[in-house]
Image: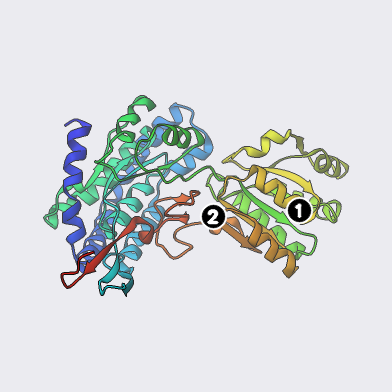
Amino acid sequence: MDLQEQLQKTQATKGILSALSNGLRGEFLHRCAEVLLKMESKILKANTQDLEQARELNLSASMLERLELDSKKLQNMAQSLLEIASFPDPLNKVLGGFSNHCGLKIEKISVPLGVIAVIYESRPNVTSDVAGLCFKSGNACVLKGGKEAQKSNAAIMEVFYEVLGEFGLPKDCMVLLPSMKKRDELKEILNAKGLIDLVIPRGGEGLIGFVSENAKIPVIKQDKGVCHIFAHHTCKQESAIAVIVNAKTSRPSVCNACETLLLDSSFASEFLPKVARALCEKGTLLRGCARSCAILKECKIACEKIPLSEYHREYGENILNLRIVEGLSGALEHISTFSSGHSEAILSEDYGVIEAFLNAVDSACVYVNASTRFSDGGEFGYGAEVGISTSKLHARGPMGVESLTSYKYKIRGDYQVR
């Protein structure tokens, strides 16, 4: 079956999914969670094969970390499905209602988006999360994972295909496309006007750029995560160090990890060596501005001097950029220039500075005295997320089931004419 034919079949399932009751959608996801755990050995065997191939291709440590599954991760995937099942019905909600000047009764009602395509790299858990979120919100889905995770993704999709069969539902409502040898082959997906209603790319900067430049259908971007923490001189230093270490080292490969630490110049000489030592204990490689390097050199702590252009980089590894700035205004100027619009944090005890930071920073998630690692669908209570949107239209930040709906107006009249 060619792609065009497959997408036509998937498009035809939209009405079936949107008509399902919330109770049945919940039962379906509960059953998927059960079957997922029952098929653990098969999924992990497929994942082992993907990992072996990835190592032969010398993929990076961060890519391998994202690719690898284990029993705990499968338990988390099953739990996410159960949480998604338990959410209130996102469909057919009355979002607003009124009568107009001539007596028309107008209601604004939530509805599915239709067919959602998600293009992603490395993480097999995305397959389960996206399929569950789309099903709960009444959407068909077209999934295109990376070739490095093809066997893992296919094994996970067998779970959903088995349960679709049990419930007498069409398998075409959830499609896992085969791996594509060339990125240009993605263009057929990106040009599928009328067959795909939304495409969400999740992956590296190259993938995001390619999709954005070539798509002829609506796109919600999960852009790279160049996340910042600004340490203000009023912060509680020991607590601030704990937050910074967590934001950088707990999982350096993820998009909500901190990539740049901005330090208030008024206490940088005192604070920077303390936080640098804590980071070095976790194996963090430090890179920074000339002032940062000079301070750390005096303390015999290694720090590589970098040009300003490097502050645009998302490392995805245990590497942290440092820059000393002149107070709040310097931090805001840096973030405005280098941020990808994902997540930023301030560590401070000054209420006025905190409020100014919250109001001025134009990113999807802005934190006070907390790690950027909380930018996550599960942490926000969404069970999982399709992605973390850095776009501003329709959805922003972690995208749960509510973000996968649109709305329409139902208007009831009594034979009025205009």
Q: Position of residue 271 (x, y in %)?
A: 81, 55
Q: Residues within 10 Å of mark 2 (few under 14, many from 20)?
A: many
Q: Which residue is mark 2?
A: 364
Task: Give whichever of discs 1 and 2 has the lower sequence position.
Answer: 1
Secondary structure beneath label 1:
helix
Residue placed most toward the observer, 92 or 242? 92
Q: Is residue 252 visible?
A: yes
Viewer-nearest residue: 259 or 48: 259
Closer to us: 372 or 298: 372
Quarter of the image with the N terminus in it: top left
What's the residue at 64%, 62% (across, down)?
A: 358
Q: Residues within 10 Å of mark 1 (few under 14, many from 20)?
A: few
Q: Position of residue 116 (x, y in %)?
A: 31, 47
Q: Quadrant of residue 28?
A: bottom left
Please say if 73 is above or below 351: above
Q: Quadrant of the C terminus?
A: bottom left
Q: Residue at x 78, y 49 (%)?
A: 325
Could you tell me residue 231's position as x and y percent? 74, 57
Q: Position of residue 175 (x, y in %)?
A: 24, 43
Outermost residue toward the right? 298
Residue that badge 1 annotates: 329
Q: Is residue 304 above or below residue 269?
A: above
| Residue drawn at 34 percent across, 30 percent down | 187
